[in-house]
Image (cartoon, rainbow, N blue to C red):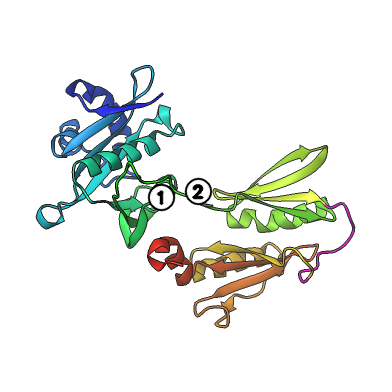
Amino acid sequence: MLTVRAYDTRDWPAVWALLEPTFRAGETYTFARDITEAQARQAWVDAPTATFVAVDTGNRIAGTYFLKPNQPGQGGHVCNCGYVVGEHARGLGVASALCEHSQREAAARGFRAMQFNCVVSTNEVAVQLWRKLGFAMVGRLPGAFRHPTRGDVDAFVMYKTLADQAATRAPEPQVIGIDHVYITVSDLARSEAFYDRVLPALGFRKNRFALNDEPHVQYYNRHFGYVLRPARSGQTHDPYAPGLHHFCLRVDTVDDVRAAAAALQAAGVDATEPYLHPGYAPDYWATFFTDPDGMRLEITNYRQERRDRHDRWDALGA
């Protein structure tokens, strides 16, 4: 069981033990990676309106957050929070508990909204969690965060109006992605040889497993799995019969589409030259190819309409 309580001065050594590796990593907060302990204490404890800790049943501090006005004066009715969860407590719902507690605490202190100013786009777990907890993406800051390994990456501004937290119902569950796709193939070895040329060139890894004594080959990346399994009939794929018509993978930019097509062609895959398809969308670039069973495959760029849909979902409305 997790308890969230007010910070006590005796908590600092345990809180610093959570903050230091997070700040040193430099992947999620804008604090300098060489921040001193005194500077961190000033930023996390002394300057904010309040600081809280999450404590587990063993009285071990599992996470912490601060609460403060986002701006002084005329912007003081909107608050800002920062959260850190200990490595030993990841995946246990600590971040959710801290964020939900902070919203109740903020509302009780008279704040009418909460704003996160720099949610790093590569911190996908946090982005998904804040959306699940009702925060809207209201802005995208191109290249605003200097990531230690990925270079300049985008950051999001996220915002939520604080209603009566006691009366606010739990957010509806949201589908946050495709977990896996299963493709039946007539000749597993032939299809495996084909996809061995395609998907590793696009950053996928590979493993094998069996279900009900049937072999499966899975290609996977950070976001989803693409699984081959043996077909139980000899029919070839008909994209115009009921079922899947084609499968489209997305890369970031038009240059990435060109690079993907070149990599596939170099691997012996008959991928088309990338070109613009204004009939689909004004900025729709794609390359097309087909697997050994006739499954149509495509690679396209992350178009502006798709970016807006992702970043401004709540603002765009139905």
Magenta residues (range)? 231-240
Tell me residue 88's x, y (percent): 42, 27
- Residue type for callout 1: Val
Residue 88 in magenta stretch: no
Name the N-terminal-most of marks 2 and 1.
Answer: 1
- Residue type for callout 2: Pro
Residue occupying the far front of the picture: 167
Residue 153 seen in the figure? no
Q: Quadrant of residue 100?
A: top left
Could you say which is closer to the camera, residue 155 or residue 134?
134
Horizontal side, residue 170 vs residue 301: left or right: left
Tell me residue 156's x, y (percent): 34, 56
The residue shown at (34%, 56%) is 155
Q: Local crowd at mark 2 within 10 Å, few (<14), some, or many (≥20)? A: few
SS under mark 1: helix
Q: CA distance from mark 2 to mark 1?
A: 15 Å
Tell me residue 146's x, y (percent): 31, 53
Determine which residue is flagged by label 2.
173
Could you say which is closer to the camera, residue 229 or residue 273?
229
Residue 286 seen in the figure? yes
Q: Local crowd at mark 1 within 10 Å, few (<14), some, or many (≥20)? A: some
The residue shown at (77%, 66%) is 242
Name the image quarter holding the N terminus.
top left
The residue shown at (46%, 71%) is 305
Q: Is 294 situated above or below 109?
A: below
Horizontal side, residue 291 vs residue 170: left or right: right
Image disc number at residue 207: none
Comparing marks 2 and 1, which lies closer to the viewer?
2
SS under mark 2: loop
Image disc number at residue 127: 1
Residue occupying the far left of the picture: 73
Tell me residue 225's x, y (percent): 63, 49
